[in-house]
Image (spheres, grey):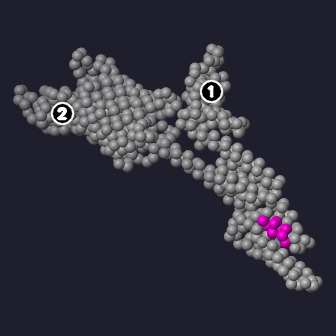
Amino acid sequence: MDLIQVMPMKKITMVLFAGIVLTSFISLQAQDGEAGIESLFSIGFGARGMALGNASVAFPEDPTAFAWNPAGMVKVERKEFLFSHTTLFEDVQYNFIGYVHPTLNAGTFGFGISRAGTGGIREFDNINGVSIEGDEFGYWWGKLSIAYAVHLFSGISFGANFEANRQVLLDYSTNGFGLDAGLHYAPSNTSMLHGFNFGYVAVNAYSPRLKLGTESEAIPPIQKLGIARTINLRDGLDRWLFLFDYEWAQNKKSKYHFGTEYSLDRSVFFRTGFDNGEITFGGGLRIHMFQLDYANSRIGDAEYFPRSHRFSLIFHIGQTLAEKLEAIQDQREQEIRDRFQERLSEERKVRIEESLKTGQEYFDKGDYFNARLEFSRVLREDRNNVAAKRRLDMTTEKEQEFQKQREDSLLSAARERDQQQRDLDFVNQRFQDGNEAMQRGEFQAAIKKWEEALEVDPDHPTIRSYISQARNQLESEINRAIASSRAYMRQENLTEARRLLERAKTQAEGNPELTRKVTGEMRNFDRMVDFISNYQAGFKRYNEGQFAEAVPYFEKALETQPENERVRQLYQNARARSNTEESNQPPEVKRDVSDKIKEGIGFYRDGRYEEALRVWEEALELDPHNVRLLEAIDGAREKLETFQQ
């Protein structure tokens, strides 16, 4: 064969098709002196990016993220898989498959395969002026992408995308390898730039070289800079997104890309944009884990090619990173609650065993009051405890035997049996009423019943002994209630703490000394409630970035607990973050602070977070209102907490 000529079997001419589809690049564009080589994949990936005018460097929020800006993969909130199909011209098929896998601590990983190609091209030989028709053949260009992105510090992320290219035409093939690198910056919620995102990417930072024919061609680098702005509406249910990209390369005209997206409840999407002067539009619909997107744009010359359509199907897999973090936090809190309940249960078990043992010892010695007291404590802890019930019944039987002996002794010597019998019945009833009240833990009521019995039988030794011991136990019960209330206050279980104090107050009625003691403890409780209320109100506003509003709540909390280091630290941070005036520190102090900040950044980049935290805290002592230092310290503490988990 002297010459191979290629031609599609449909509409366009042999020369146009060979110049656009079958060559390795969309090359040598000669408009207004512009020249250069551009990859076929520069037309972008995914329906979302196409509908937004290919403006996705600063906010690539789907599984095509690494193709726009590998660092921007950090905007993908959960594992996502995407398949995209684009209809080009003359049966050229352009497909893309992408997957992004974000992790909590190990960065974000991306994987993609893209392919563009066509078949049905007829081969002709020109031999001595005679055209001889040959076989049909095809052409395709594929690319494998493996990407990674990681948070660095203060909202800055870095990403890289390794690419392996392969082209096949007839019996010819070639491979080339390249690398994209990008940066992404998302300001914190407390920053003045909150809501903005910034991105930069160097496409082909390491250029792939392809040699399909006799000459090797390198795809030159392209640089892109992007900015995005999000506006949340309807309490965050709806969102309006604006994007702008600026693209430049050597020997080529700069390009501008603009796009906007409005989403309803993050489920229905409307998009439009300008791709270097061409209008683009599209939309999407998400139902549960599935999302279908569509885009329409003009990719080729309007004189020869119609507008192209692109469809993408996205699978949203699992929880978002925020949901995972919340689930982990909930799990930790539940584990803390479970451990606390387990400890309470174990302590309760120990108390029951000790009370049963102690009660049995009292019973064996004939001290039925304390025996009844211990067995009653067991039943208040476990109302169905068989051993306590049985031993309490045995105690009652012994008390009844003792009482019967006294009845017989008194009746035998009494002249007025009827009156004495009524007195004895009254004493017995009050004695029994007192025992029942004591079993319920109502010591004051029990004492009152026994005192009524003493008015009739003032020499009753058992009742006198029971009254004396009940008063001692009442004081012990109130002391235990106060101690338990304090323990619950430390756990911030204010409802249970209040219930115990109210019960102690009721038990102390009629005893001035115990009443004063309980009343003083209730005043301490009220101060603790006031502290927790102010602390929580200040902490809520602090987390929402309302630092000036948080300051007075922390001040009130410190009035109650001035020694609380955690509240004092939050108070100082809130004051510093709410202070908008420039620091008026002397120049030499500013230099020292600046040197320590740089030293801490060095430690932080090396993963030496404890040393970075120590240096930055030293700098904060010199300049306590430095917001930059506070944010750096918060970041170091988060890293330390992550590695300690």
Q: Does the magenta stretch include residue 405?
A: no
Residue 643 vs residue 186, the one in the foreground: 186
Identify which residue is drawn at 49% across, 27% down.
192
Residue sitting at x 17%, y 36%:
90
Left or right of 321: which side holds 638? right
The amino acid type, in three-letter code, at marker 1 is Trp
Secondary element under disc 2, as helix, strand or loop, is: loop
Residues shaded magenta: 445-453
Point 35% across, 37% down: residue: 262
Crowd tier of the residue under label 2, counting other residues whose Cα lies within 10 Å: few below 14, some 14–19, many 20 or above: some
Is residue 327 shown to the viewer in this render?
yes
Residue 381: % across, % down? 70, 64
Residue corresponding to mark 1: 616
Residue 202 seen by the camera: no
C-alpha span from label 2 to label 1: 60 Å
Judging depth in this view, the residue of 75 and 64 nearest the camera is 75
Q: Which of 74 and 492 is in front in this view?
A: 492
What residue is disc 2 on? Answer: 306
Question: In the displayed structure, would residue 255 be above or below residue 514?
Answer: above
Query: Is residue 609 left or right of 262 when viewed as pictured?
Result: right
